[in-house]
Amino acid sequence: MENNSLAVFEGKNIRRVWHNEEWWFVIEDIIFALTDSKDPKQYLSKMKQRDEPLAQGWVQIVRTLLVLTTGGNQNMNCTNTEGAFRIIQSIPSPKAEPFKLWLAKTGYGRIQEIENPELAQDRAKGYYELKGYPKDWIDKRLRGIAIRQDLTDVLKNRNAIFGTPEM
C-alpha cells in the first residue's frame, strides 16, 4: 500500500496517509475543499467554538501524522473517515451538503437493512454488478458468503472455534 496519496474532491486535493490499516485525511484540506476558506486553521478554530461536542471529542478523532507536502514531510492534523464525517457534519457550507445528504441516505439504508437483511444482499449484488462481475460469479459469491455464515454459526453454537466447550 502506498504510504501517501491524494484524494480529489471537486478539483481540490486532500492529502491522506495510510496509518493503522486505514486512510487518514489532512483536516485543513477537508476544510479548504468544503469551504474555500482562505485560512482553514482559523475556520477550524471557530468551528470548534460553535460545536462544543466536536471540540470536546477532538482528541479522540485527530492524530498528528507525518504527511508529505511540497516542502517535505510535515506533522499535520489528520482524521480517519469516521472523524472526517463528524467534522463535515459541523461545516455549514453548501459544498458540505452533498456529503451530509449522502451520510443520511447511507444511514437510513443501513437501518432498513437491519429490518430486512435481504436488502443488504441486494446492495452487495448491485455493487458487484457495477464492478462488472458476471452474473454467475455474483451468484456463486453470494451463495459462498451465505454458506460460510451458516458454517460459522454452527461452529459457534458448538463452541468449536469461538469458545471453550461446556463441561
Image (cartoon, rainbow, N blue to C red):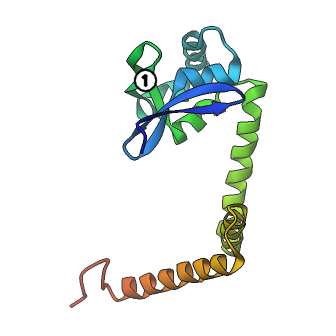
Residue 133 at x, y = what percent? Answer: 67, 69
* Left or right for 110, reference 166: right
Rendered-image quadrant of the N terminus: top left
Secondary structure category for the residue under label 1: strand
Q: Residue at x 61, y 26 (%)?
A: 13
In the picture of the structure, the residue carrying the numbered disc 1 is 68
Is residue 90 visible to the viewer in this orientation of the structure? yes
**Count of labels in the image:** 1
Q: Residue at x 42, y 82 (%)?
A: 152
Q: Quadrant of residue 160?
A: bottom left
Is residue 51 visible to the viewer in this orientation of the structure? no
Q: Residue at x 44, y 86 (%)?
A: 151
Residue 110 at x, y = what percent? Answer: 66, 60
- Image height of 99 relative to 65, above or below: below
32, 159: nearer the viewer: 32
- Image height of 162 relative to 165, above or below: above
* Left or right for 65, reference 70: left
- Image height of 13 relative to 2, above or below: above
84, 141: nearer the viewer: 141
Rendered-image quadrant of the C terminus: bottom left
- Image height of 75 relative to 140, above or below: above
Q: Quadrant of residue 89?
A: top right
95, 92: nearer the viewer: 95
* Left or right for 141, reference 128: left
Q: Residue at x 61, y 13 (%)?
A: 43
Q: Quadrant of residue 164?
A: bottom left
Callout 1: 10 Å neighbours few (<14), some, many (20+)? some
Amino acid residing under circle 1: Leu
Residue 69 at x, y = what percent? Answer: 46, 19
